Amino acid sequence: MLPDEVARVLSIDLVDARRIWSRVQKDAALPSRAPATIRRAALDRALARGPIPQLEVLDRRASSVDPFVKYAFSTNGGGAIEAVRIPLERQGRYSVCVSSQVGCALACAFCATGRMGLTRNLEVWEIVDQVRTVRADLTEGRVHGLVFQGMGEPLANVDRVIRAIRILTDPSGLAIDQRNVTVCTSGLPTGIRRIADELPSARLGISIGDARPGRRAALMPIDDAHPLDEVLEAAGAHSTRTGYAPMWAYTLLAGVNDDDDAANAFADRAIAFAERYGVRPRLSLIPYNDVEGAPFTRSAGETLERFRDVLGARGVGSIVRYSGGGDIGAACGQLVTLKTSSGRRDRRLDPSYPRS
């Protein structure tokens, strides 16, 4: 709930509601005794609602090669999820890669989460608590931004994702600037338009897979239901509404989507989008990260540079995304479950593991 809803549900003053709500968002708990800033009667009403739900932290793993940290959580509703703390360029600032579902139904071929299938959507508090937990774990610095690019398709759980973002960006809580929130999607046009209308300061990311007609569906089955043209039309509506350039993510797979033809098709899409909507998309090239059981390998470094050169020759700029935490399975496309030090999957992270 947001502060005004807390005030209404508990029948308390809005000022008290904001102060109580702020404590919950920052500490995931309420004080047992009323501080000077909160009236006792208001606190008693909040305490009577019961304990604040929290995710159980099953594991926390720091990369040995970069400052990325991956968290594994057990959810009360069954199943396990992961989130990643991402260091930003400016010292003391972090972004959190947030999960929105246990598993994912979209089955993108190059994504570990997509190979799990979907167990369920996360509740609003489960999305929020991932960020709250990462924040509480910081010894210095702050959570500066959010990227909904963890487990699950955010726009398949769009109601709860929108509500979670409103909570996380509320000035009375964690106060994350909505302009530093990016919602990434495999391509659900209705959800893209809702983000534009309901969160006009949030940014949009789209996974492209392959820009050539008939090729994308082999990597991303969602293309059969929502072809790339339809997705990019919705992205254009988002840019028109917000003024923001969408981020287009492209994972290069050796011998699949990394040749000159693929690069030119990607450039064609970017040029056409800019001409139609007056905004140049931001192209983010992602070296493939190994996914157990997937039939892909990473493109060679010279192939990636050739791909960038083809784009550049067409006047289309791009960046190569650094995917940190590869040694702990925290890199792009790798979120699924943690493993024990012996290499076996930890049964606690298996959604079918029985719980008392």
Image: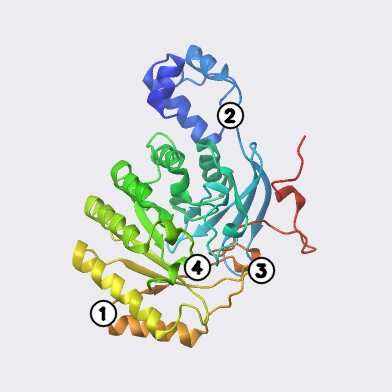
**Tag 3 or tag 1, which sits nearer the N-term?**
3
How packed mark 1 is, by other alpha carbons closer than 10 Å (few <14, some 14-19, many 20 or more), is few
- Marks 1 and 3, how far apart at CA: 37 Å
Percent across and percent down for residue 351 are 69, 46
Relative to 204, is 174 above or below? Answer: above
Residue at 28 percent across and 58 percent down: it is 233
Q: Nearer the viewer, mark 2 or mark 1?
A: 1
Q: Residues within 10 Å of mark 3 (few under 14, many from 20)?
A: few
Do callouts 2 and 1 mark residues in contact (Cβ within 8 Å)? no
Disc sitting over residue 52 in the figure: 2
Secondary structure found at label 3: loop
Residue at figure coordinates x 58%, y 43% from the top left: 120
Q: Earlier in the sequence, mark 2 or mark 4?
A: 2
Measuring from the top left, give residue 338's x and y in whole percent. Answer: 68, 57
The residue tagged 1 is 315
Marks 4 and 1, Cα distance to the nearest angstrom? 27 Å
Q: Amino acid at mark 3?
A: Gly
Where does label 4 land, which residue?
219
Give yes or no for contact between labels 1 and 3 (Cβ–Cβ under 8 Å): no
Q: Which residue is mark 3?
A: 293
Tell which of 52 and 239 is nearer to you. Answer: 239
The three-letter amino acid code for the residue at tag 1 is: Gly
Q: CA distance from mark 3 to mark 2?
A: 39 Å
2 or 4: mark nearer the eye: 4
